[in-house]
Amino acid sequence: MFEQVKLSYDFSALQPTIDELTMVTHYTKHHATYTKNLNATMERLPELAGETIEQILSHLENIKDPALRTAIRNNGGGYYNHNLYFDTLSPNGPRTPSGKLAAAIDRTFGSFEVMKEKLAAAAVGQFGSGWAWLSANSEGDVMISSSPNQDNPMMETRGEWRPILGIDVWEHAYYLTYKNLRADYVDALFRVVDWGKVDEYYHKMID
């Protein structure tokens, strides 16, 4: 059974960047529903028992039933994406990357600041609901992309690229505080990104 990531901080800890009501609603309602629906769908797919969510999302073509494939895509994506999102936020973590991740960012984008600008542009420019991503491959390369709905780079590349940081731009992630000002939310979110956690996800890909 898949479980929601356990938060290492209180629902109020990310204020004023993310208000407490948004955190409570996002985690206990939206994320919990994706998790519940994923587990319910998995009961109908016993052949996938024992596979990780990364393996499942990277090979959705293995699910032959179109309705079940869509259910896993939407709910499994929502589950994985939100686990990553909540786990890479923190009131106290380092606000800049270091080590191999910092070097990869500099190599690809020229600087951390340029990477932030490009990631923010991907998030603001995502039409409708979806996500913007910083992803890595097993060679240690990094890239920026965006995805609609609850899709992510693992689905789109059959696991070649895995997200290490995601910006949720569904309106439920920010509308109570920022209304229609998505760019303000995206800019503020960088104040609570825990680059120590992002680095952990990066090293899972390269180590």
Image (cartoon, helix red, strand yellow):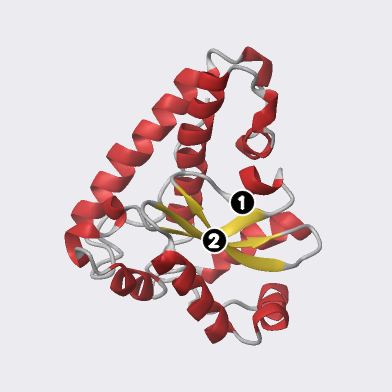
Task: State how far apart marks 2 and 1 are (Cα).
Answer: 8 Å
116 on left or right of 130: right
Quick one: label 2, few (<14), some, or many (20+) residues within 10 Å? many
The spot of residue 165 in percent (x, y) is 54, 61
158 on left or right of 120: right
Query: Is residue 203 in view from this perspective?
Result: yes
| Mark number, residue 31 | none
The part of the image, by quadrant, that contains residue 206 is: bottom right
Disc 1 marks which amino acid?
Pro
Question: In what element is the residue under mark 2?
Answer: strand
| Mark number, residue 153 | 1
- Please give the name of the residue rendered at 73% of the width and 81% of the height, measured from the top-left corner: 107
Contact, mark 2 vs mark 1 (Cβ under 8 Å): yes
The spot of residue 61 in percent (x, y) is 68, 29
Quadrant including the C terminus: bottom right
Disc 2 marks which amino acid?
Trp
